[in-house]
Image (tube, rainbow, N blue to C red):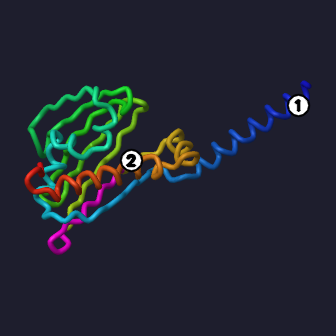
Amino acid sequence: MPTLLLVLLLILVAVVCLVLLLASRKPDRFVVERSLVINAPPEPIFALIDDFHNWAHWSPWEKLDPDMARRYSGPTAGVGAVYGWESKKAGAGQMTITEVQPGALVLIDLAFSKPFKADNVARFELTPEGKATRVRWTMSGKAPLMSKVMDLLIGMDKMVGGDFEKGLAAMKDRAEQPATAA
């Protein structure tokens, strides 16, 4: 029996070492991106992104926990607007708008404190396509070893990409109803 336990332990150590080796070879940065064409001009879509108070209309994480504690500071919208949250289901963190190009771009510093610490950048690009607008939502950041392990086992794109798709679909629904947009 002790030989079987030793063999199982050696196999477990070998698997952990293999996972760590493979994870360490992954890139030091990650990028998750989704885009969707919304049948609306850029302005009402931009208002949904540029004012954190409007995120409740489309953000998938807002719908995750109705008891989420939220705090807003700085200007209502645009550069310097800050949105912090704390939730049992959505973790905790803070977003700060760092750059805007009205109707075209919103850059956000995204600092997570729970369930793990991470500093990322969210980017929303709005590009007119005829009478519609393509919205491209990107999140990027550093990938420390634990992030690389998670990416290897689950996939960062798989973990976050579906939420981006839900958020863009909800944004589309909201923006395509002019009477309720923003």
Q: Nearer the viewer, residue 154 or 111?
A: 154
In this view, the residue in front, 159 or 75, is 159
* Horizontal relation, residue 68 to residue 27: left or right: left
Three-letter amino acid code of the residue under disc 1: Leu
Whole-percent x, y for residue 120 in the image? 34, 44
Mark 2 or 1: in front is: 1
In the rendered structure, which segment of residues is drawn in magenta? 128-139
Is residue 89 left or right of 58 when viewed as pictured?
Answer: right
Mark 1 closeness class: few <14, some 14–19, many ≥20 residues within 10 Å: few
Q: Residue at x 35, y 54 (%)?
A: 165
Which residue appears at 10% of the width and 58% of the height? 43
| Residue 138 place in picture, x, y as percent | 33, 54
Which residue, as the protein is rendered here, is positioned at the far bottom? Answer: 130
Q: Residue at x 9, y 38 (%)?
A: 75
- The amino acid marked with disc number 2 is Gly
Q: CA distance from mark 2 to mark 1?
A: 43 Å
Q: What residue is pinned by disc 2?
A: 141
Against 68, is 43 above or below? below
Q: Local crowd at mark 2 within 10 Å, few (<14), some, or many (≥20)?
A: some
Residue under circle 1?
A: 4
Q: Quadrant of the N terminus?
A: top right
Q: Position of residue 19 (x, y in %)?
A: 65, 44
Seen at 27% across and 34% down, the residue is: 94
Q: Is residue 162 above or below residue 1?
A: below
